[in-house]
Amino acid sequence: MRILTASDGALLVEADDLEQAMRLNLAWDGVPGVVERIPGARTVLVRYDPLRTTAAALAGVLAATEVDAAELPDAGEVEVPVRYDGEDLDETATLLGVSAEELVARHLAADWRVAFSGFAPGFGYAVSDDALFDVPRRSSPRTRVPAGSVALAGAFSGVYPRESPGGWQLIGRTDLAMWDIDRDPPALFAPGRRVRFVRAERAAVVASAESAGGADPRGGEASATQGAR
C-alpha cells in the first residue's frame, strides 16, 4: 500500500485493488485515534484526531497491518427482498449471454458484500463472488430512476436510495428504505456488510420488514440483521 498525507487530520491509503481496500478498511476498525474511515474502489481515507495520534505514528500502525487473506471480518448482514421486474432485465441478460431467469438466479445466489459507499447518501456498491457480473452502464443514462431500484453496473450491484438520475441497468426493485436519518445507522448498505438478495412480491416485502421489527418498510427500521456497525 501507499500512504499519503491528505490534510492535517487525514491520511489517504492507496491499496493494490478493491479487495485489499475492503480488507484494510475493516481491519482498521478500532485503531486508536482514528475518527472515520472512508473506503473507495482502491483507497481508504483515514481521518484521525491530532490530539490523540500523529500522522507518522498512525501511518506506522496502518502500514504494519496484516489482513486475513481467507476471510473478511464480519460486518453484519442485510436482507433485501426484490421483485425482479426491472426495465433492463432482459437487455442486461442478453448483454451477459444468459437468460433473464439465469441472471436472476445468480443474482440471488451470489455472495454480495458492500465495498464502499458513494453517489448519494445510502447508496452502497456491493460486489460478489460471481464473475458473471461485469455489466456495462447504459449508453444513455435516465434522468429519473425510482427509489428502491435494484441495479447493476460494472462488477457492482446497488439500490437507489432515492429518485435520481442514473445510468445503471435496472433489474428489479425493493420497498426497503436504504437511507433513513432517524435510523441508527441511517444506511442499510454499510461498507463490509453482507447483502442477501431474496425474491419477493410486494406483500412479502412488507411482511419481511414487519417481521424484523420495522413498522414500515419505507421508513423506520428495515429488514436487516445489522451485526457490527
Image (cartoon, rainbow, N blue to C red):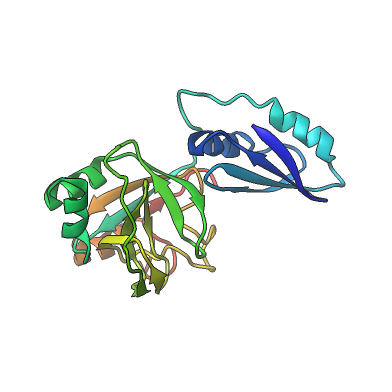
In the rendered structure, the answer to whether residue 140 lies left or right of residue 31 reads left
Please indicate, yes or no, whether residue 200 appears anywhere in the rendered image: no
- Residue at horizontal 52 percent and vertical 64 percent from the top: 121
Which residue is farthest right? Answer: 51
| For residue 114, above or below residue 216 | above
- Residue at horizontal 21 percent and vertical 51 percent from the top: 95
- For the N terminus, the image quarter is top right
Front residue of this view, candidates 211 and 172 = 172
- Residue at horizontal 36 percent and vertical 64 percent from the top: 167
| For residue 109, above or below residue 142 | above
Which residue is farthest bottom? Answer: 143
Q: Position of residue 129 (x, y in %)?
A: 34, 36
Q: Position of residue 78 (x, y in %)?
A: 39, 50
Front residue of this view, candidates 34 and 145 = 145
Front residue of this view, candidates 167 and 146 = 167
| For residue 206, above or below residue 127 | below
Please indicate, yes or no, whether residue 212 appears anywhere in the rendered image: yes
- Residue at horizontal 19 percent and vertical 48 percent from the top: 103
Q: Position of residue 171 (x, y in %)?
A: 24, 59
Q: Position of residue 212 (x, y in %)?
A: 36, 56
Q: How many marks?
A: 0
Which residue is farthest front? Answer: 139
Front residue of this view, candidates 69 and 99 = 99
Q: Quadrant of residue 206?
A: bottom left
